Image (cartoon, rainbow, N blue to C red):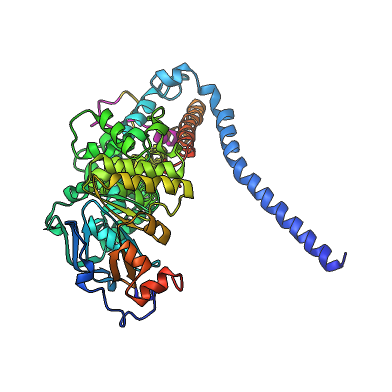
Amino acid sequence: MTLRNRWRKTLSYIMLSLTGVCAVVAVSILFLILGTLVYNGWRALDWNFFTKLPKPPGETGGGLANAIVGSLEIVFLATLMGLPVGFMAGVYLSEFGGKTFAFLVRYMADLLNGVPSIVIGIFVWTVVVTRYHFSAVAGAVALALILIPITARSTEQFMSSVPQTLREGALALGASKWKSIATVVVPAAYRGIATGMILGVARISGETAPLMFTSLNNEFWGGGLTQPTASLPYVIFLRATSAYDDWHRQAWAAGLVLLVGVLFANIAARLILSRGIAVQK
Amino acid sequence: MSQLDEPMTMSTANLPSASPAAGKPVGHQGKLKAIDLNFYYGAYQALHGITLEVPANRITALIGPSGCGKSTFLRTLNRISETIRNTRVEGQVLLDDEDVANVDVTALRRRVGMVFQKSNPFPKSIFDNVAYGLKVNGFRGALKDAVEHSLKRAALWEEVKDKLHKSAYALSGGQQQRLCIARALAVDPEVLLLDEPCSALDPIATAKIEDLLFTLKDQCTIVIVTHNMQQAARVADRTGFFLLGKLIEYNTTEVIFKNPTRQETEDYITGRFG
């Protein structure tokens, strides 16, 4: 074997090892994060954590039931507002959009997708909070604004991948355009659409910055949707930046609960999609 | 479509269309008539002055090389061509002497059914596929009987009667295509358009579909686009030869295949080009 050949083999081996190491680093980060959260937060994770209100600073015990319920409330409201709008916009882009207008909408959706979430928070603060006050609804509006472009683009993508022949098949039987979309195209793409929606909802569940300016926090059960409401991401921020060990532990635990929830949503989404798009290739 | 995308580069200037007299069917009343039909994809003209009369209860085949406009012509008959953006039609298509442009498009497509080149069953059960057209057209009656009747007409009933609620994708390619025919027949169309329905099928499945066409022509008028000349010779009563967007010759199948009047037709039939 010549020197040159040996050098080429060695280089190939080095590069292969390097990419392998980087791949291991990439996948191990998730496990490192999970491990850190479990190590630091598991002691605070008990029945009380899920059922009790927070104790005043200094006292140990208590839970974050209000933040868990608050997060669910806000995300649920945001889903109610954001998913239908995003879905319909996606349908429009895929099925009706003319060239120029669809291009504009698509481009704007991508831009909106890239807007830092804290800017969305400030925007909603200006438009909603300064006129009324901090509330779960304001938080939900902020999250919905993030959810709309995500849902619109993923819906559009999966609907566009439905073969044109299916649309023609429905139209050729005397279905109106809307009927063909509702009864053939959407059902053919529903797995992908549902996956996109779940991933979108998972994404907004972890958003913190938009909630700082909108739903704020509440150490007690909120007074309804129009009142300041606790949420897990924001509570993590508040607890983690406090001076109390017990609160730090609660922050870790809250992080763990949030991450596990989002992970489950992601896994569910992958499972739905892995069963394949309902369309025959 | 830009000029560069034009599928053909041959000049069409020296190819006059068939004379209108050649388009007249013998004996049977014209069910569908195209009169001086032009069709454009953007600036590109795909059909040049097509005049053709399709007789009722007969099988009419349209043959010609790829890109000659035969499928485009077929798609103007039920106005499915409108689903492609930036297209334009000039001239008339008459269904029972009524301009299809003036007929409500969903009503037109119920009367003029279509089967596509690649079988396109919906991602639904076999039953729901056949019932689809009935449901969207507000059929009130025994859906089950109607589905069974359509599947029998498409000679598929015996093969699927025990798995009506299985996915249509579980069927073989030939069965899927017959399912699509059953689906089209369910709304009881007066005309059935078939766009190269056998191009993806083996000879046995093809034979089944051809047999089927013979049994259907008592009840409806059939127009079939095919790139398979033997198929046209086997099934069709009349045959039209398209070339470069023009109808070159249209006559009884026997004349087209045994005694064509035009040199281009003879060249194509004998395989000298195409």
Give the x, y percent position of residue B191.
Answer: 23, 50
Relative to B232, is A32 above or below?
A: above
Q: How many marks?
A: 0
Between B50 and B166, the residue placed more toward the observer is B50
Relative to B149, is B226 above or below?
A: below
Give the x, y percent position of residue B153.
Answer: 31, 38
Left or right side of A27 for B108:
left
Between A44 and B104, the residue placed more toward the observer is B104
Relative to B156, is B67 above or below?
A: below
Left or right side of A15 for B125:
left
Residue sitting at 60 percent across and 46 percent down?
A26
Q: Is residue B228 visible?
A: no
The stretch drawn in magenta includes residue B213: no
Q: Can residue B63 be seen in this view?
A: yes
Between B37 and A133, the residue placed more toward the observer is B37
Between B251 and B40, the residue placed more toward the observer is B251
- Magenta: main secondary structure equals loop
Of all residues shown, which one is farthest toward the bottom? B14
Give the x, y percent position of residue A107.
Answer: 33, 59
Give the x, y percent position of residue B90.
Answer: 18, 68
Quadrant where the N terminus of chain A sits is bottom right
What residue range appears in magenta? A222-237
Residue A218, image quadrant: top left
Of all residues shown, which one is farthest toward the right? A1
